[in-house]
Amino acid sequence: MPHSSLLHYQHQHSTQTLQQGLDEYFAAHPSSLRGGDLSAEAQLFFRCHDTVHVLYSCSTSLPDEAVVKIASLRGTTEGLAVLKGYALHESRAIYGQLHATDVLRNLGATLWAVPRTWWRCSRQTLRWPWTSPPEYLDMPLAALRARYGIRVSHVDSTADD
Protein backbone atom coordinates (compact mmCIF):
# COMPACT_ATOMS: atom_id res chain seq x y z
CA MET A 1 0.00 0.00 0.00
CA PRO A 2 1.54 3.35 -0.95
CA HIS A 3 2.42 5.62 1.95
CA SER A 4 0.19 8.45 0.69
CA SER A 5 -2.94 6.29 0.78
CA LEU A 6 -2.65 5.50 4.48
CA LEU A 7 -4.92 7.18 6.97
CA HIS A 8 -3.30 9.11 9.82
CA TYR A 9 -3.90 6.37 12.41
CA GLN A 10 -2.07 3.92 10.14
CA HIS A 11 1.30 5.64 10.50
CA GLN A 12 3.65 4.14 13.09
CA HIS A 13 4.38 7.53 14.65
CA SER A 14 0.86 8.97 14.45
CA THR A 15 0.35 11.79 16.94
CA GLN A 16 -3.40 11.18 16.98
CA THR A 17 -4.88 10.00 20.24
CA LEU A 18 -6.38 6.54 20.31
CA GLN A 19 -9.84 8.17 20.28
CA GLN A 20 -8.95 10.28 17.22
CA GLY A 21 -7.65 7.14 15.51
CA LEU A 22 -10.89 5.31 16.27
CA ASP A 23 -12.90 8.27 14.98
CA GLU A 24 -10.90 8.27 11.73
CA TYR A 25 -11.25 4.49 11.41
CA PHE A 26 -15.05 4.66 11.79
CA ALA A 27 -15.28 7.60 9.37
CA ALA A 28 -13.32 5.59 6.76
CA HIS A 29 -15.22 2.35 7.49
CA PRO A 30 -18.76 3.39 8.51
CA SER A 31 -20.04 -0.17 8.19
CA SER A 32 -17.86 -0.95 11.24
CA LEU A 33 -20.11 1.21 13.40
CA ARG A 34 -22.33 -1.18 15.25
CA GLY A 35 -25.56 -0.14 16.87
CA GLY A 36 -27.06 -1.00 20.21
CA ASP A 37 -28.82 -4.03 18.73
CA LEU A 38 -25.78 -6.13 19.61
CA SER A 39 -25.57 -8.21 22.76
CA ALA A 40 -23.48 -6.69 25.57
CA GLU A 41 -20.86 -9.38 24.93
CA ALA A 42 -20.68 -8.49 21.23
CA GLN A 43 -20.49 -4.76 21.97
CA LEU A 44 -17.48 -5.32 24.23
CA PHE A 45 -15.86 -7.70 21.76
CA PHE A 46 -16.20 -5.32 18.80
CA ARG A 47 -15.03 -2.32 20.84
CA CYS A 48 -11.84 -4.21 21.70
CA HIS A 49 -11.55 -5.64 18.16
CA ASP A 50 -11.86 -2.18 16.57
CA THR A 51 -9.22 -0.82 18.96
CA VAL A 52 -6.84 -3.50 17.68
CA HIS A 53 -7.67 -2.36 14.11
CA VAL A 54 -6.43 1.12 15.00
CA LEU A 55 -3.40 0.10 17.08
CA TYR A 56 -2.08 -2.20 14.37
CA SER A 57 -3.07 0.24 11.55
CA CYS A 58 -5.58 -2.05 9.89
CA SER A 59 -8.40 -1.34 7.47
CA THR A 60 -11.27 -3.75 6.92
CA SER A 61 -9.66 -5.57 3.99
CA LEU A 62 -9.46 -9.35 4.33
CA PRO A 63 -5.66 -9.39 4.82
CA ASP A 64 -5.99 -6.69 7.49
CA GLU A 65 -8.77 -8.66 9.19
CA ALA A 66 -6.32 -11.56 9.37
CA VAL A 67 -3.76 -9.24 10.97
CA VAL A 68 -6.35 -8.16 13.55
CA LYS A 69 -7.19 -11.77 14.39
CA ILE A 70 -3.55 -12.76 14.85
CA ALA A 71 -2.74 -9.56 16.76
CA SER A 72 -5.74 -10.18 19.02
CA LEU A 73 -4.58 -13.74 19.71
CA ARG A 74 -0.85 -13.09 20.06
CA GLY A 75 -0.48 -9.39 20.84
CA THR A 76 -3.17 -8.83 23.48
CA THR A 77 -3.84 -10.09 26.98
CA GLU A 78 -6.95 -11.90 25.73
CA GLY A 79 -4.97 -14.65 23.98
CA LEU A 80 -7.00 -17.70 22.95
CA ALA A 81 -10.05 -16.41 24.83
CA VAL A 82 -10.55 -13.95 21.95
CA LEU A 83 -11.88 -16.88 19.92
CA LYS A 84 -15.12 -16.71 21.95
CA GLY A 85 -15.81 -13.32 20.37
CA TYR A 86 -15.31 -14.66 16.87
CA ALA A 87 -17.80 -17.44 17.67
CA LEU A 88 -20.60 -15.00 18.62
CA HIS A 89 -23.59 -15.07 16.28
CA GLU A 90 -22.93 -11.39 15.43
CA SER A 91 -19.41 -12.29 14.24
CA ARG A 92 -20.63 -15.33 12.32
CA ALA A 93 -23.17 -13.11 10.51
CA ILE A 94 -20.26 -11.04 9.18
CA TYR A 95 -18.47 -14.16 7.95
CA GLY A 96 -21.63 -15.17 6.11
CA GLN A 97 -21.27 -12.07 3.94
CA LEU A 98 -17.88 -13.15 2.58
CA HIS A 99 -17.68 -14.54 -0.93
CA ALA A 100 -15.31 -17.36 -1.83
CA THR A 101 -13.88 -15.33 -4.73
CA ASP A 102 -12.94 -12.50 -2.34
CA VAL A 103 -11.25 -14.95 0.00
CA LEU A 104 -9.31 -16.59 -2.84
CA ARG A 105 -8.32 -13.23 -4.33
CA ASN A 106 -6.82 -12.16 -0.98
CA LEU A 107 -5.24 -15.47 -0.04
CA GLY A 108 -1.66 -14.55 -1.01
CA ALA A 109 -1.60 -11.31 0.96
CA THR A 110 -3.24 -13.02 3.91
CA LEU A 111 -0.75 -15.88 3.91
CA TRP A 112 2.07 -13.32 4.05
CA ALA A 113 0.41 -11.21 6.76
CA VAL A 114 -0.25 -14.02 9.23
CA PRO A 115 3.34 -15.16 9.98
CA ARG A 116 4.66 -11.59 9.82
CA THR A 117 2.06 -10.47 12.36
CA TRP A 118 2.74 -13.48 14.59
CA TRP A 119 6.46 -12.61 14.54
CA ARG A 120 5.90 -8.91 15.25
CA CYS A 121 3.53 -9.68 18.11
CA SER A 122 6.02 -12.13 19.63
CA ARG A 123 8.51 -9.26 19.75
CA GLN A 124 6.19 -6.82 21.56
CA THR A 125 7.51 -5.62 24.92
CA LEU A 126 4.06 -6.00 26.52
CA ARG A 127 0.72 -7.48 25.50
CA TRP A 128 -1.94 -4.89 24.76
CA PRO A 129 -4.72 -5.01 27.40
CA TRP A 130 -7.74 -6.36 25.51
CA THR A 131 -10.13 -4.22 27.54
CA SER A 132 -7.90 -1.17 27.55
CA PRO A 133 -8.26 1.47 30.26
CA PRO A 134 -10.46 4.46 29.27
CA GLU A 135 -7.58 6.88 29.87
CA TYR A 136 -5.75 5.32 26.92
CA LEU A 137 -8.27 6.99 24.61
CA ASP A 138 -6.55 10.33 25.31
CA MET A 139 -3.02 9.03 24.71
CA PRO A 140 -1.17 9.41 21.40
CA LEU A 141 -1.01 6.30 19.26
CA ALA A 142 2.76 6.70 18.88
CA ALA A 143 3.21 6.62 22.66
CA LEU A 144 0.95 3.58 23.10
CA ARG A 145 2.70 1.71 20.28
CA ALA A 146 6.11 2.56 21.75
CA ARG A 147 5.06 1.44 25.24
CA TYR A 148 3.78 -1.93 24.03
CA GLY A 149 6.30 -2.45 21.23
CA ILE A 150 3.60 -2.53 18.54
CA ARG A 151 4.77 -2.34 14.94
CA VAL A 152 1.99 -1.36 12.60
CA SER A 153 0.94 -3.74 9.87
CA HIS A 154 1.76 -1.67 6.79
CA VAL A 155 5.40 -1.67 5.71
CA ASP A 156 5.25 1.87 4.31
CA SER A 157 3.77 3.22 7.51
CA THR A 158 6.95 2.72 9.53
CA ALA A 159 8.56 5.84 8.06
CA ASP A 160 8.36 9.02 10.13
CA ASP A 161 5.24 11.06 9.44
Image (tube, rainbow, N blue to C red):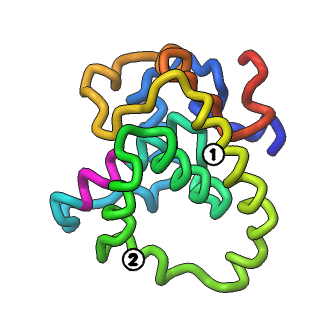
Residue span colored magenta: 42-48
Secondary structure character of the magenta stretch overall: helix
Q: Mark 2 is on which residue type?
A: Arg
Q: Position of residue 153 (x, y in %)?
A: 67, 40
Disc 2: CA contacts within 10 A as few (<14), some (14-19) or many (>=20): few
The mark found on residue 126 in the picture is none
In this view, the residue in front, 30 or 159, is 159
Disc 1: CA contacts within 10 A as few (<14), some (14-19) or many (>=20): some
* Quarter location, residue 152: top right
Dot 2 corresponds to which residue? 92
Q: Give the CA distance from mark 1 to mark 2.
A: 24 Å
Q: Position of residue 60 (x, y in %)?
A: 57, 57
Which residue sits at x=51%, y=55%?
69
Disc 1 to disc 2: CB gap under 8 Å? no
Which residue sits at x=38%, y=29%?
19
Q: Position of residue 10 (x, y in %)?
A: 63, 34
